[in-house]
Image (cartoon, rainbow, N blue to C red):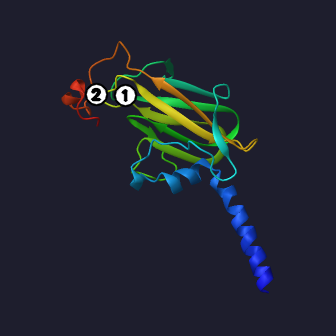
């Protein structure tokens, strides 16, 4: 009986890394909201996944507002962000500033992170630009896993402030124009 229990215990321990390969598991386990590291992504291999690889050909981003394609952001404005993949994947998406929704992982402490546990070919998000867009822009990063190999897939895009933006929206304090409060 002891041998049987030992074999079962070893088998369960051997299966634990298989759970760790999901971006959602990584975010919940290693970068919780309490850690204050909501914009981080896996840099190294976890579980059976090897070190992440850059995924510039399989991930695409489309930013739009009111059905019109956009390439730049205006302060405090909400946009639709479509992320698509050539294969079905789970994903972790973050924005360096502003907010990104929906927060499917239910983590309200991370307004700039979404984790999707479902295996999908893409997903839609609402990306709300901060009231003060940093000089370097707003970086959107995606880490995904498609389970076709042992690598996390990584890609990013940076959206900069548009040259032609109207007045700040009412929810943005005037101080945001000088680089003050974000929201």
Q: Residue at x 46, y 35 (%)?
A: 126
Q: Residue at x 75, y 80 (%)?
A: 5
Q: Is residue 38 above or below residue 95?
A: below
Q: Is residue 66 visible?
A: no
Residue 31: x %, y % from top left: 48, 51
Tell me: 20 left or right of 93.
right
Q: Find the residue positioned furthest to the left.
A: 175
Dots 1, 2 in contact, CB < 8 A: yes
Q: Residue at x 37, y 20 (%)?
A: 161
Count of marks placed on residues: 2
> Which of the labelled discs sits on residue 169, or is there none?
2
Disc 1 designates what residue?
A: 77
Quadrant housing residue 129: top left
Q: In the picture, which quadrant includes the C terminus?
A: top left
> Which of the labelled discs sits on residue 52, or is there none?
none
Tell me: 48 left or right of 174.
right
Give the Cα separation between the discs numbered 1 and 2.
Answer: 7 Å
Bin the neighbour count of mark 1 within 10 Å (Cα to Cα): few under 14, some 14-19, many 20 and up. Answer: some
Q: Is residue 48 visible?
A: yes
């Amino acid at each position: 009986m002891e041998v049987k229990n030992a074999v079962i215990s070893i088998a369960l321990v051997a299966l634990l890394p298989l759970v760790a390969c999901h971006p959602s598991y990584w975010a919940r386990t290693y970068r919780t909201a309490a850690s204050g590291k909501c914009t981080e992504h896996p840099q190294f291999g976890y579980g059976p996944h090897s070190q992440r690889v850059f995924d510039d050909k399989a991930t695409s981003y489309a930013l739009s507002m009111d059905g019109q394609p956009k390439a730049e952001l205006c302060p405090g404005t909400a946009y639709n962000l479509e992320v698509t993949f050539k294969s079905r994947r789970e994903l972790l998406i973050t924005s360096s500033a502003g907010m990104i929704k929906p927060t499917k992982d239910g983590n309200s402490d991370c307004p700039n992170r979404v984790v999707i546990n479902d295996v999908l070919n893409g997903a839609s998000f609402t990306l709300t630009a901060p009231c003060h867009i940093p000089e370097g822009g707003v970086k959107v990063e995606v880490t995904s896993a498609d389970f076709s190999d042992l690598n996390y897939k990584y890609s990013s895009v940076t959206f900069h402030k548009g040259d032609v933006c109207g007045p700040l929206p009412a929810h943005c304090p005037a101080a945001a124009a000088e680089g003050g409060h974000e929201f």
